[in-house]
Image: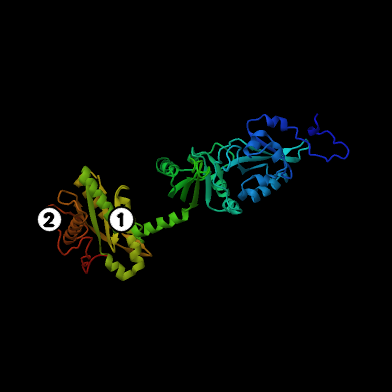
Amino acid sequence: MSDDEGARPAAGEPRRRARPLAADVFDTMPVAVGLFGADGVLLHANPVLADLLGATPDKVRGSLLVDLVEEAERDRVTNRIAQVVGRGRNAFECLLAVSPAGLAGVRWPVRAHVSAAYGPTGQVEGIVLQVFDFGPADAPPPLPSGLAEVLEEGSDFLLTAAPDGHISYGNRAAREVLGVRLHDGTLRLEDVLEPASLTLYRDVIEPQVLGGGSWQGELTLRTRLGHPMPVSARIVAHRPALGAAAGPGAPRSVSLFARDITDLKSAEKKLRQLATHDYLTGLPNRLLVYDRLEHALNRYTRHGTPVALMFCDLDGFKPINDRYGHQVGDAVLTEVADRIHSVVRDTDTAARLGGDEFAVLLEDYGDRSMLAVVAGRLIAAISQPIRIEGQTVQVGMSIGIAVASERLREVDAVVAAADGAMYKAKARGKGTFEFWDDDDEPPADAPAGGGSEIPPDPGAAI
């Protein structure tokens, strides 16, 4: 055994640290390896590590690990060393500041893996630093002191991945909610992106970000339980600087910053519901049924798909409202809406236009005789007695039907025609339906969108 391997020093000679027994093995390895004591002092650097640091092994021996890393990393590394020695963690990664020999003035960070070195008794006797990739680190530039901890503990999600999609880092929120596992090596962005968002990433975001830009918008992530989560996201690429002359290098990694917007989406959905649906019955309102009618007429024009609009007006509703009050009146309208919904198909649109006026939009229904069947069923269903708060009341329904044709291809024309046909049904005695024919003209005193109800007969049954 040589003096460096543990021979006792001569009398009066200062005692030196023994050369680590593993040093000879590490000196032959193609990776960069540094052996440190538990106090973070470098005991031995193999030639590959020494070359990365731009010095000889003897020159760097005795250096502190915290002095060899990027300046912004030093406080964090000091804490991590204490945690490893105290058995609070087994390993950590840091950015080693390298200045390879022969590249004067060029400096960049490389990713280093630091782990505990255990002695025969199982105690931590030191730490081992290893560098496998000598290129610039696949990570964002070093963060200012304290900022890394803020990102780690924040409620927003932070993911860092290689350009090929392999995830190398996820903060605490990403690990707990998305199931990201550090140092797993197999997890990819496609594992945390819903299919539609993954397609958007591959087709739009990735080329834009890797081409030099950044991207901001909405994506849908998949939680560790498999549930979709809408997020507001920003994605950027990281390009380590290799010196002023060389300019920025190719993207080494990308980072995704995301915020859960589930509550915002829920609020938006409620607002859309309020804007397009009747607050009392829950049926689509005038705005939505007219929009769907416009799309249906476009399909009729392009493909000839049959379209019909039924304009439905209650008979005898106003006396109920006047006699029993709006609470009973509202209950009647709600029951009428339920009965209409029970008659029409799921593919049809039943809507409340306002007051006691309803509409039904039908597509691809077969022929005119089927419309007559549907109208008859609606009238029969609505005319059944309604029991509300101990009172039995009864209303009827008059229906006007307009069928899309070469003459009726616009929303306003179809609505006016259906409204006019409904007036014909009212005039014929109520509780019936009428078709608008191409040789009919919508009455000038019936505005598109419905008119006022014809006053009920004084002796009308309630």
Residue sitting nearer the eye, 128 or 322:
128
Q: Is 350 drawn above or below residue 326 in the view shown?
A: above
Instruction: Name the secondary structure under disc 1.
Output: helix
Q: Is residue 332 left or right of residue 7?
A: left
Residue sitting nearer the eye, 353 or 142:
142
Instruction: Name the secondary structure under disc 2.
Output: loop
Q: Position of residue 52 (x, y in %)?
A: 62, 38
Question: What residue is rendered at 60% in x and 35% in y?
Answer: 132
Of tags 2 and 1, which is closer to the observer? 1
Give me the disc on residue 288. 1
Amino acid type at mark 1: Leu
Which residue matches tag 2? 440
Please tell me in which quadrant of the rendered image residue 290 appears.
bottom left
Amino acid type at mark 2: Asp
Question: What residue is rendered at 76% in x and 38% in y?
Answer: 122
Residue 380 in sight here: no
Count numbered badges in the picture.
Answer: 2
Residue 266 in sight here: yes
Question: What residue is rendered at 31% in x and 70% in y?
Answer: 323
Q: Position of residue 106 (x, y in %)?
A: 56, 42
**If the image is split into quadrants, where does the N terminus sit?**
top right
Question: What residue is rendered at 39% in x and 59% in y?
Answer: 271
* Sequence-wise first label, 2 or 1: 1
Residue sitting nearer the eye, 150 or 8:
8
Spatial separation of the CA atoms under disc 2 and disc 1:
27 Å
Q: Where is residue 152 in the image (x, y as percent from the top left)?
A: 58, 50
Badge 1 density bin: few <14, some 14–19, many ≥20, Cα 10 Å: some
Q: Is residue 150 left or right of residue 306?
A: right
Badge 2 density bin: few <14, some 14–19, many ≥20, Cα 10 Å: few
Q: In this view, does 222 lie to the left or right of 58?
A: left
**If the image is split into quadrants, where does the C terminus sit?**
bottom left
